[in-house]
Every structure is written in C-alpha cells, then in structure tokens.
Image: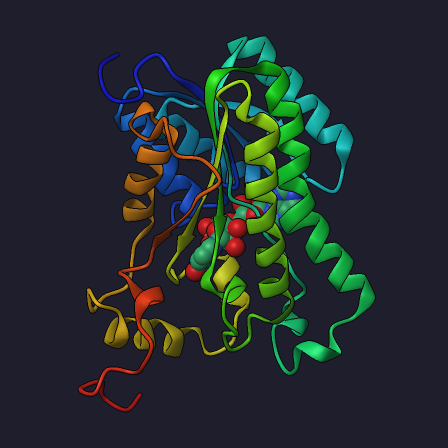
C-alpha cells in the first residue's frame, strides 16, 4: 500500500466501539497504509469489535484482559504468528471503579487503587516488554493519558495518580527500549465522550469548560487524536521519545478561565 504507514504492522489494544480513541488511531493508521491487529475485552465486546475490524480490514488476535497474563501471552503469540515482526503498539486501556471517581480521592480503597494501577499503568509496561521481543528496530509504542496526571481535575481522583505513574513509565520505558531505536510516547488527550469517560461525573460540564477555555475554543475528537497518533507512530517522529504530547486544543497552557467564558 501507499502512505505514511505503508509496510508497517501494528497491534492496537483498547477498541471498545467506534467512539474509542483507539478506533480513531486505528482508522488513521489503516487510512495511511498500515496493517493492524485488534483485541477485544471479553465476549461482550467481541460482537462490537468484529464489524469494526471488518471495516478496517484489521485482523482480530483475540480476547485481552490485561489482568490475565495468559490472555496477553496468547495475544502476542497470535500477533507473532500473523505478522511475524511488528512496528507499533497502541495501548488505550484504563479502568477504575466508577464509585471512586466521585467524592474525595483520599477515600480511595486499597483494592481499587491496586486494580486501577494494574489495569491502567502496569499493563503498559507488561505490553511493552512483550512487544519488544517481536518489534522491529525503530518501532513505536504509544499510550493515552490525561491532564489529570499533572493537575487536580474534578472526579479524576485515583485515575490522576495512575496517569502520573503512566507518564513516568513512558520516560523509563523510553530509556530501556531506546537502544534499539524503539520509541515510547503518550498522547495527553482532551476530554472526549467515550465509554470510559461515562464513568466520570459532570462530564458534560468538563467538555463545556474545555470548549470555552481552550485556545482553540473546542473539544477534540477521536479522529484528531488519531491523526496526531499517526505522527507518533510513523517515522515522521523518529527522533521523538519519552514525550507527553498534548492533543487538547491547547487547554494545558491556559492558566485562567477565559474572561468571556459564559457561566456553565
Ligand atoms: P474506551 O472505553 O473506548 O476504551 C477503554 C478501553 O479499555 C476499552 O476498550 C476497554 O475494553 C479497555 N479495558 C479496560 N479494562 C481492561 C482490561 N482489564 N483489560 C483489557 N482492556 C481493558 O474509552 P477511551 O476514552 O477511548 O479510553 C482509551 C484511553 O484513553 C484510556 O487510557 C483513557 O484513560 C484515555 N483517555 C481518555 C480521555 C477521554 O476523555 N475519553 C482523555 C484522555 C485520555
């Protein structure tokens, strides 16, 4: 095929439906010539991912629950069997108990803290270690983070702590994998109404707030995150690693509510 991603093969984890950020990235990759493999989390998502894979011409490499190492073993065996070597991996996975994305962070439980960290942080390192084995030199790993890692955002709670650790993981992994030219980066996406975001309280308000107060005066879409992801997954960014790249209409540079923002 032709395009920026021609000849490149990659694994994309985290497509739940056609609003998933992972789907936006997958579409951008395929539209630019990549061959991709997708996973699904359990039978419930299988039915939703199958038609999306067909639409993208993607290969499904099976069920993936990052808390179950056997499922990851199987996914990576299937990827190696189908593609041999790969050039990129996208990790678009996070989870926290909805109950704890409400109220005070200080009340977070040990069980949910550990679970949130395992699914949203450790999984990226676990996947990077497996990916390294079957990745071509010069490959690219990408994860998704949020501004709640840097500043306190309403309702983000334990997920903010997890994203801070995920961003630190990006830097440590960039050093570990840099010797082979493998790059590790994150996109810090502005708020988008996805399934995962439905667990966050006052989400409509958060979207409006970003719309009124970001330099570009609008929110972002999975397609736009996909296009920025394309840069980080392609050779255009071959000298970029350990980076947290904001795709948020510039919201992260603003220090104060816009004077002309309406009350919302
Ligand atoms: P989404 O619900 O479409 O995707 C989340 C994915 O995580 C799903 O595919 C789900 O199956 C997967 N997942 C959860 N637990 C898992 C587990 N145990 N094993 C395997 N997979 C598991 O929502 P999204 O918003 O596209 O989320 C993708 C990533 O983007 C997440 O890391 C999220 O934190 C991040 N992000 C989202 C926003 C936003 O506003 N939507 C903003 C910044 C960053």
Residue 198 shows in this picture: yes
Q: How far across and how far down the image is residue 193, in percent?
A: 40, 62
Q: How far across and how far down the image is residue 240, in percent?
A: 39, 34
Instruction: Check the image and report above or below for 261 versus 26.
Output: below
Q: Which quadrant: the N terminus?
A: top left
Q: Is residue 193 left or right of residue 114?
A: left
Q: Residue furthest bottom?
A: 263
Q: How far across and how far down the image is residue 230, in percent?
A: 32, 34
Q: Quadrant of residue 62?
A: top right
Q: Is residue 112 left or right of residue 194?
A: right
* Image coloring type: rainbow
Q: Residue furthest right?
A: 110
Instruction: Check the image and report above or below for 14 versus 34.
Output: below
Q: Nearer the viewer, residue 256 or 7?
A: 256
Q: Nearer the viewer, residue 240 or 264?
A: 240
Q: Quadrant of residue 212?
A: bottom left
Q: How far across and how far down the image is residue 251, in percent?
A: 31, 66
Write the residue at 57% across / 33% down.
175
């Amino acid at each position: 095929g032709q395009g920026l991603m021609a000849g490149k093969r990659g694994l994309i984890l985290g497509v739940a439906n056609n609003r998933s950020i992972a789907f936006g990235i997958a579409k951008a990759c395929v539209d630019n010539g990549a061959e991709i493999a997708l996973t699904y989390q359990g039978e419930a998502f299988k039915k939703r991912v199958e038609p999306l894979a067909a639409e993208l011409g993607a290969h499904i490499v099976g069920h993936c629950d990052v808390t179950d190492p056997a499922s990851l073993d199987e996914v990576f065996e299937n990827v190696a069997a189908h593609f041999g070597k790969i050039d990129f991996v996208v990790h678009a996975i996070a989870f926290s108990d909805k109950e704890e994305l409400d109220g005070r962070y200080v009340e977070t439980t040990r069980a949910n803290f550990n679970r949130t960290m395992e699914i949203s942080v450790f999984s990226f390192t676990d996947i990077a270690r497996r990916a390294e084995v079957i990745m071509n030199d010069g490959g690219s790993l990408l994860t998704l983070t949020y501004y709640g890692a840097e500043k306190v955002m309403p309702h983000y709670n334990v997920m903010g702590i997890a994203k801070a650790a995920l961003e630190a993981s990006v830097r440590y992994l960039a050093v570990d994998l840099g010797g082979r030219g493998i790059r590790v980066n994150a996109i810090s996406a502005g708020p988008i109404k996805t399934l995962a975001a439905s667990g966050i309280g006052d989400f409509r308000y958060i979207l409006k707030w970003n719309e009124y107060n970001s330099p570009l005066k609008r929110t972002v879409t999975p397609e736009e995150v996909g296009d920025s992801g394309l840069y980080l997954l392609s050779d255009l960014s071959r000298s970029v690693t350990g980076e947290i790249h904001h795709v948020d209409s510039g919201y992260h540079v603003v220090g104060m509510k816009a004077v002309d923002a309406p009350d919302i």
